[in-house]
Amino acid sequence: MNLPHMAKDYRQLHDPNAEYTMRELSAETMGVDAKRGGGRDVEITDVQTTMVDGNFPWTLVRIYTDAGVVGTGEAYWGAGVPELVDRMAPFIIGENPLDIDRLYEHLIQKMSGEGSVEGVTVTAIAGIEVALHDLAGKITELPAYQLLGGKYRDEVRVYCDCHTEDEADPEACADEAERVVDELGYDALKFDLDVPSGHEKDRANRHLRPGEIRHKAEIVEKVTERVKDKADVAFDCHWTFSPNSAKRLAAEIEEYDVWWLEDPVPPENLDVQEEVTKSTLTPITVGENRYRVTEERRLIENQAVDIVAPDLPKVGGMRETQKIADVANQYYIPVAMHNVSSPIGTMASAHVGAAIPNALAVEYHSYELGWWSDLVEEDVIDGGSIAVPEKPGLGLTLDLDAVEDHMVDGETLFDEA
């Protein structure tokens, strides 16, 4: 701010009868009406949601203010999330959107009866919290990563969650891996291993027969050998196997260049998770089914995970994910953010990925959805990475026409800003 340019002399800044006062100058530089108390004097006036029918039902959240500034966030998909956001709206309407931590804790406390320790209540709060970061960044004219303390990197690596028409065919997986690397430019991939092998007898007991393990190891072998050093490749099990089967599978694929094996056992029993992780040299990744730092912390402190994978719009939001990363960093554990979001939640993850030292990558789950990028006016993913925007807030502008074109049936579009 160039004060001499805006005031005739130094004395004018302190003269209550002068054309500009110091308070007015501060407000003017922030684009907020000075009569309303400068940048601090902003109130939330409304909270709205719209669900987009993507490869998941993305719940977008918008927060409106009396300054005419609007923030956009995203909550992880789940039944009842929009209703929970509506339920919480009265708790933040009339409040100052810059008080992000206070409002977050306020919602956690107010929603304790609905279960604000975990589950869809935390997810709904996360959608509001992301929108508050976008809003606060716009008010202060700072990118969201700056609100988190600044950045370690200018761009964040993206790993592409890959699929094929026949996900059980090892050669088809290898072909798709090669295509995604060579044609789409990604150097980080993930494939599913909880796919049928033809050897199953009873999937309910979580036991892997020898033929099933050989089949999954063949997928790992074909994919990793095909891409070699051109890409890191992870493999997802979706909490499917028993501890013994998970340990046998992890041991079988130790000889291959596996980036990580994700969620090999059900998520509830952390003692079992710790046992599996410590039994193998194959890196184990867990975290998307844990909520807030209080739950993720147990995984990390018990060293039951080699790479932690919180899902930002699910786990509690941007600052909660940063807190998880802070705990993980004390144990030298990297963070690979699970992400099945629209561009809004994806960019929120990228801002956190820029602001933490131990960020490994952010997932992209919608490469087969041709209109994913149409939801915003800006480019998001380019060449397997996200350049972190310098624009205020998240740095994205919703294309409301595109949102309207892809809304879940029965949804109502947001109000204009």
Image (spheres, helix red, strand yellow):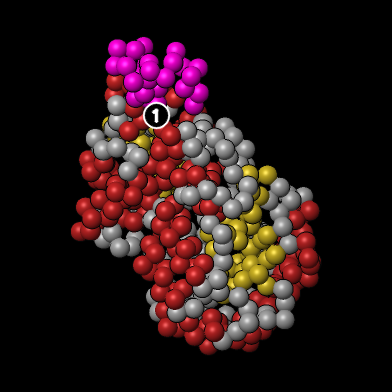
Residue 405 placement (x, y as % from top left): 50, 33
Q: Residue 239, percent across and down? A: 49, 73
Q: What crowding class fits label 1: few (fewer than 14 Cα within 10 Å), some (14-19), or many (20 or more)?
A: some
Q: Residue at x 36, y 23 (%)?
A: 22
Query: Start and end of the magenta stretch?
Result: 1-27
In percent of width and height, residue 407 lies at 45, 38
Quarter of image, res 199: bottom right
Indicate whether 323 appears above or below 144. below
Number of marks in the image? 1
Query: What amino acid type is highlighted by mark number 1?
Result: Val
The reply, left or right, for residue 199 in relation to residue 78 is right
The answer to whether residue 40 shows anywhere in this view is: yes
Q: Quadrant of residue 160?
A: bottom right
Q: Is residue 228 left or right of residue 246?
A: right
With respect to residue 133, does 191 lie above or below? below
- Please state if 201 lies on the left or on the right of 154 as rendered: left
Q: Residue 323 in the image: state x and y as whole percent.
A: 43, 60
Tell me if residue 97 is in the magenta stretch.
no
Assess whether residue 4 is covered by the magenta stretch: yes
Q: Residue furthest front?
A: 11
Q: Residue at x 55, y 70 (%)?
A: 333
Residue at horizontal 30 percent and vertical 12 percent from the top:
17
Label 1 sits on a secondary structure element that is loop
Above-or-below relation of 256 to 50 = below
The residue depicted at 56 percent of the width and 49 percent of the height is 151
Q: Is residue 206 visible?
A: no
Quarter containing the C terminus: top left
Residue under label 1: 69
